[in-house]
Image (cartoon, coloured by chain):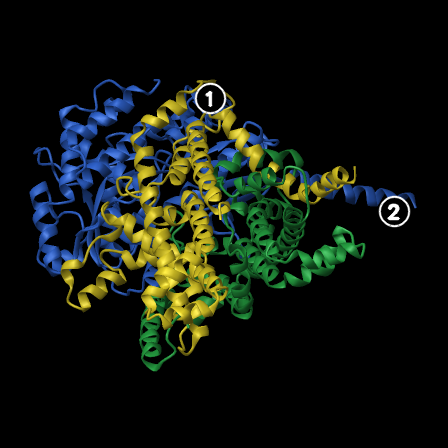
Chain colours: A green, B yellow, C blue
Amino acid sequence: MLIGQDKKTTIISQIILTFLAIIFSLPILIMLKISFVGKGFINNYLQVLRFDYTFKFFYNSLIVSFFTVLIVLTLSILTAYSLSKLKPIAKNTFFNLILIGLMVPGVSLIVPIFLLFLKFNLFKSYLAMILPISAGIIPFAILLFKNYMDNIPNDLIEAAKIDGAGPLYILRKIILPLSYSIMVVVIIWTFLMTWNDYSTALFFVRDKELLPVTHLPNYFNMATMAAGNIPDYGPFFACLVLISLPIMLVYLFLQKFIEDGVTAGASKN
Amino acid sequence: MNLNKSNVRDILYILPSFIFITIFFFYPIGYIFGISFFDWNGVSQNKSFVGLENYKNFFVDPIALKALKNQILWGIITIFSQMFLGLSMAILLRSKVRFKIVYKVIFFFPNIISIVVVAYIFNKIYDNNFGELNYFLEMIKLNILSHPWLGDPDTALYCLMVANIWQWSGFSFLLYHAGLTQINEDLYESARIDGANIFNIVRSIVIPLLKPTHIALLILGIIGTLKTFDIIYLTTRGGPARSTEFLSTYVFQAGIIEFKASYASTIALMIVLIALVLTTIQVKAYSRD
Amino acid sequence: MKILFKLFFLAFSFIWFSNIAKAEVTYSCWNCMTLDSDGEGNPNNALKDFNAAAPNVKLVAVQYPYGDYIQTLPLSMRSGTSDDLMAFQVGSMLSTYAEYLEDLTPYAEKEWGANWKDKFLSVGIEQTTVNGKLVALPQVMSAAGALWYNQTIFDKFNLSVPTNWDEWISVSNTLKDNGVVGFMHGAKDSWINYDMFIGIANEVDPGKVYEAEAGNISWTHESLVKATSLWGEMFSNGIMQEGALGNAQYPDVHQAFTSGKAAMMTMGTWNNYSTFTNSGLNGSKESYGFTEDFKYGITGLPDMNGDGKHGRLFASPDVSIGMSASSSNKEEAWSALKVIIENLQSTYAKDLWVSSMTGVPFDLSDATSDFAKEALNYQLGMANNTYGKREFIYSEIKTALGDAMQNVAVGDMTALEAMEMVEKASQSVKR
């Protein structure tokens, strides 16, 4: 055993873990406390839920997240499969170039991509969000999938090849069924990144009806008419709590799979 | 003959992703590379060619240097803290403690919530006059430690590091938790028979065998550090006195606030360059195993 | 059949033409001054008044958070997808965007005649004119540099409002000893630091800061160095609260002052609504969670040059509005702009904005008390006798000054070194 299974070790571990857990949960408790401020807990949340755009924004986020997950899964699985199990020309070069995609700071991408969208008039469609966000996640997803697939033993594949199976068949019938846990990871990670995204919508969405839920807090400012936008704390934080609920639910539901999954992206044989 | 055809065909799988990446990363890199040779305010129709002047200015810019130093310090402290905490949690959770799922959720939860929330919470906690931290210190009679945390250039950066470590330790934890499941338990048995205690085991077996995880966390950590923006922007905005300025926030400040788009592009390119260099080193170390 | 057809044609034309008559004018802003609609599509105050004054124009105003607004503005400008009307801050922001804005001089002359300038406060029009081109019109002015104080707190501790530097120090420290923040300042926000600097510099030697900006004198002039060192001292002699560099003016200072936890702050006329009107103050009370009716007062910064007089104010347009040169309906945009600027001044006066036009007093009907009315009238008097403007034109100087002030505040630089840094930036400006 790595760590003792005896009572003494267990108790010490429990104490340390509880201590850490308390420290880690403090900020969250403070966040909840703030949503009670002002008009009171229920009123704050009701105010948010009654607002015109709340459900529209949630809906927009769902649509964008759904399609982003779809695109990211499809493209990254295909790419990772090729990089891992097939023999494309310049395999390593491609992989390295893909990694570069992880490195560019967001601020510098704004202007060129904006000009691009201008040319193709994408500002009033969901694509304005789906495309850039997908592009941002794909390199990471490829990384995760490739590492996981590298760990899948090749004998199964060889056996299938002898039986005359083509690469797509192998992908569908052998690789994918073995990759469900990493798939769940990528789904959760993609959903998380898309759901929490703020700046993509800020720059590229020019239609109020299409904004995602992360922009909702902007509408809960105090009417002091002074420097413009001071948050009205109660409803503002209620808003932030509501935004984090879907992800929390998804995480609680699927955290078992994450465990098995994320790991696979990082570990080797 | 057959080999060549399939090699080309196999590229088709990569192409869609690659096209995405070309459009959304390589094209912008080319674009900002282009404008880094001009003097442009980001708005005007006019811009004048200035050659390498932006690059020259960058290398003698005291603010850029300070930003870089801040980022290096940040990277070293946050990455290793997260790894240490993550590994400790992962090891402790292999004992027979109860309520494991509660701990797992609490440790990973900070990773889920929006950065806006994290920033507001910590802004509030660190507030000098009305914040929870100083209030707490007063309550336990440690008033002398009461401090303007985010208002003091000597402490601001470290306070923000705490926020970052809080947010990302859970991620390291997850990776290590998984890594541990792949180590053969028999190794521990034989070590124990030889009289090793937990610390020996961790040092000589666990840590070496987790090398792939370490490296993955390092790569992601470095890239994450270079791109860190939101937590700074939403709390200190790079102050006080540039003590929390990063190259990434400097890009924003120069490009958007000060109307120096060309200089901002230069800085952005430097960030990409640094990331490239550091990552190549990491990847080489990774593949050597 | 024919008659039906004619009727149909008439109905169609009627609808079509009335839609044309109701052309849509779009306006984007970070502070839309209630010209927008609330979350349920209901027009806010100024928009209601606008609709009454200009029934043939449909104004669609959208408010963005300031940070978002300045990030997306360059994009929309360069792509020609900007709104018909846009809000600007004067100074470097307006100069940068000037080339995309319509020259409003011909419109103004046609609307108000050759002497149209007389209708406006000159300090406002000066700042919305870039290289001789009238690129925007000031909507409301903001005069800064006042010392706001909570008379109730002063009465409670038997103190009087400081009239000179030494009194400022002693009063602040006494208040601190009594558990109240004396003077609170949001040193995290560069804009209020600029206000503070301009205020101190003008109090020490009026006008010198403007001459330095114009490049006529060096920033290392002794009065400016003195101003900088006074600024630095504020962080250690007890005037400012501890940790000022970590506080923002909004919401931290605003909240602390309005709810009675801080006794003094420096603010300007833009803050009148939330403090001196019933509707504004009730909003503050609700959000900040306090109920006491404090007596808030206004005076100038304490005397720092020994002439026995407190400081004066300095003003800039708080919001100025320009028209896009690539707008497709300029005539309607102008009609909308004219109404927003001229007809709605009485609306703004109700919310206690200083008008950008001459001869428009505050509308004190919703003022909280007589004490408040006194304070407001005193302030208005000060606003009519300013040192000059509140905004800098050159972003290089602004940046250097911001850094200089922070460095002096934390003790990394002496006042002289800081001013030398600013002078260096000043010399790099192409005037």
In percent of the image, x 14 and y 27: which residue is there?
C223
Is residue A72 shown to the viewer in this render? yes
The residue pinned by badge 2 equals C4
Numbered disc 1: secondary structure = strand
Q: Is residue A14 above or below residue C85?
A: below
- Farthest-out residue, bottom: A7
Amino acid under label 1?
Phe
The residue pinned by badge 1 equals B38
Q: Is residue A100 above or below residue C207?
A: below
Q: Residues under labels 1 and 2: Cα distance? A: 66 Å
Between residue A136 and residue A61, name the one nearer to us.
A136
Q: Quadrant of residue B266?
A: top left
Residue C169 in percent (x, y) is at: 9, 46
Amino acid under label 2?
Leu
| Circle nearer the viewer, 1 or 2 | 1
Residue B56 in percent (x, y) is at: 37, 22
Do badges 1 and 2 share one subunit? Answer: no
Residue A194 in percent (x, y) is at: 55, 53
Numbered disc 2: secondary structure = helix
In percent of the image, x 85 and y 42: which residue is there?
C6
